[in-house]
Image (spheres, grey):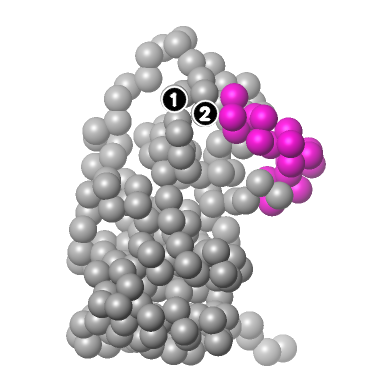
Amino acid sequence: MTLKRTRIIVADDHPFILFALRQLVTAEVDFELVAEASTGLEALSLVRSIIPDVAVIDVGMPRMNGIVLTRKIRDEQPSVKVLVLTAYDDEAHLKQALAAGASGFVVKRSATTTLIPAIRAAIAGGTFVDPIVAERLNGLAQTPTPGAVELSPREREVLILTAFGHATKEIAELMAIGTKSVETYRARASEKLGLNSRAEIVRFALAEGWLA
């Protein structure tokens, strides 16, 4: 039986980083590095022509930055999972990446240990947040006021699945309910918790320990 390999594109404008990414990806027997790029436009062109399973892209590339590129890939090729690679470990960059549709946020200095788990999490339909950032967010997260907000089991489940990166249709199938019901549960839960975006849902899920 032939091993099904995950097809991956990596993009970074620094040759050393690109070399390191190549080594990490090709060391996995079930991964296949199908292309490399050093600019945002080159990466977009490769994604359009190859349609890989995963694209690992640097935020600070010339000729289209990684956030814009992530949004374009997710709009044009929604089947492609995008992992954002960055030197920044702050909440602002995390929010931008998740809002653009990224399935993972990896800090460069920890990539040797986190990139492969991030790719595997994305393939499985999850959302990966680098532990460096996750720990900081957990430390900054406000302690919920006891009894102030109470989610129903359905609302909680919808938020968890949303935080893990599942689309509305996928959540509906997993929960065996209609898409309208999913949207209603998500809207109710978001209103109760004051959450206004997917990035904020992910942050709340991190604080609650749902993504551990």
Q: Amino acid at mark 2?
A: Ser
Of 80 and 32, nearer the camera is: 80
- Residue 9 screen position, x and y as percent: 44, 81
* The residue positioned farthest toward the front in the image shown: 63
Residues in magenta?
A: 170-188
Name which residue lies at 45% across and 74% down: 55
Of 116 and 87, nearer the camera is: 87
SS class, disc 2: helix
Whether residue 180 is in magenta: the answer is: yes
Name which residue lies at 78% across and 38% down: 177
For residue 21, say whether it is visible: no
Q: Main secondary structure of the magenta part?
A: helix
Q: Is residue 143 above or below residue 110?
A: above
- Count the labels in the image: 2
- Residue 19 screen position, x and y as percent: 27, 87
Mark drawn on residue 29:
none
Whether residue 127 is in magenta: the answer is: no
Q: Amino acid at mark 1?
A: Gly
Assess whether mark 1 and mark 2 are in contact (beta carbons under 8 angstroms).
yes
Q: Is residue 160 left or right of residue 69?
A: right
Name which residue lies at 62% across and 21% down: 152
For residue 75, say whether it is visible: yes
Disc 2 to disc 1, C-alpha distance: 6 Å
Q: Which residue is mark 1?
A: 194
Of 205 and 59, nearer the camera is: 59
- Please tell me in which quadrant of the rendered image residue 10 appears: bottom left
Name which residue lies at 43% across and 56% down: 100
- Residue 126 screen position, x and y as percent: 52, 55
Q: Which residue is mark 2?
A: 190
